[in-house]
Image (spheres, grey):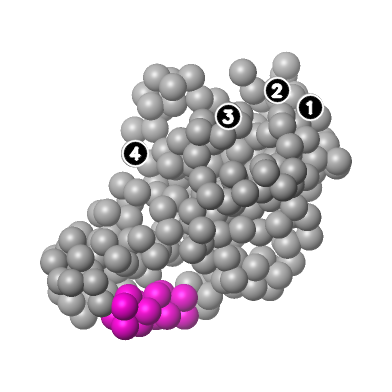
Amino acid sequence: MIKLTKEYKTIIFDCDGVVLNSNKIKTNVFYEVTKHFGHKFSQSLVDYHLINGGISRYQKFEYFITKILQKPYDKILNEELLEDFAKYVKRSLINCEIAEGLDQLKAKNPKANWLIVSGSDQNELQEVFKALNIQRYFEGGIFGSPDDKNTIIEREMECKNIKKPALFFGDSKYDYLAAKKANLDFVFLSGWSDVKNYQPWCDENKILCVKNFLDFLYQESKI
């Protein structure tokens, strides 16, 4: 059961598809940086990426090399792909659409500690959030890969940076599983999500599904 915003001590946000409208950007970049291997291989990576939303690019490129290309793991190739990916993404995200409603959500509970917990590269996230002037919202920290979400959440709980009750806003099944593992409340944001046929899944798991933060705040106002 989701509590009122004012009751939470910590609010956790995924980045892509939640705070930034960047899912399509990332999907396109996965294709662009691997297209020289051929459409078949690039599309296989895109398909894997879409099915495994929330998992870091580090894992996805390793999968691309070893499972899609079916080659022995190549550290140099992996680093080249990661570097190319980062260049494309940084250029694209600077002009990325930012979710509406952050100010209104913050006003509901100014004392709640806000964190980003993302599968995106941590250094890249911090640079982009600073360029977009939204790092100020997330006083609890902006965290990402190479650590995975489970590792980040466990670590931040141990050091008391995440205190319960805590709420996680995500847009992927992986986000939900990470929240569930840590016994955090979870809200699924559908507006920019890559998850197909999400409503039956949300209904089956009794997950609150809203389009965006403004929709969440509107529904809360009716309680």
Where is residue 129? Give x, y as percent.
Answer: 66, 66
Mark 2 residue element = loop
Q: Dot 4: few (<14), some (14–19), or many (≥20) neighbours within 10 Å?
A: few
- Marks 1 and 3, Cα distance to the nearest angstrom? 16 Å
* Secondary structure found at label 4: loop
Q: Residue furthest front?
A: 158
Q: Is residue 84 magenta?
A: yes
Amino acid on which disc 3 is placed: Asn
Given the image, on which type of amino acid does mark 1 rest?
Glu
Please give the residue where the numbered disc 1 appears in the rendered image: 7
- Residue 50 placed where, x, y %? 33, 51
For residue 73, side relative to residue 124 (left or right): left
Which residue is at a point 52% across and 66% down the rendered structure image?
121
Q: Is residue 91 above or below residue 48?
A: below
Type of amino acid under label 4: Lys
Q: Earlier in the sequence, mark 1 or mark 4?
A: 1
Marks 1,4: beta carbons within 8 A: no
Q: Which residue is mark 2?
A: 3
Q: Which residues are magenta?
A: 75-88
**Badge nearest the viewer, 3 or 2:** 3
In the image, which disc is placed on residue 196? 4
Q: Identify the residue at horizontal 50%, vertical 25% (top origin).
A: 207
- Mark 1, mark 4: which one is toward the viewer? 1
Instruction: Tell me which numbered mark, 3 or 2, is placed earlier along the sequence.
Output: 2
Category of crowding for the residue at label 1, using alpha-carbon neighbours closer than 10 angstroms: few (below 14), some (14–19), many (at least 20): some
Q: Is label 3 in contact with label 4 (beta carbons under 8 Å)?
A: no
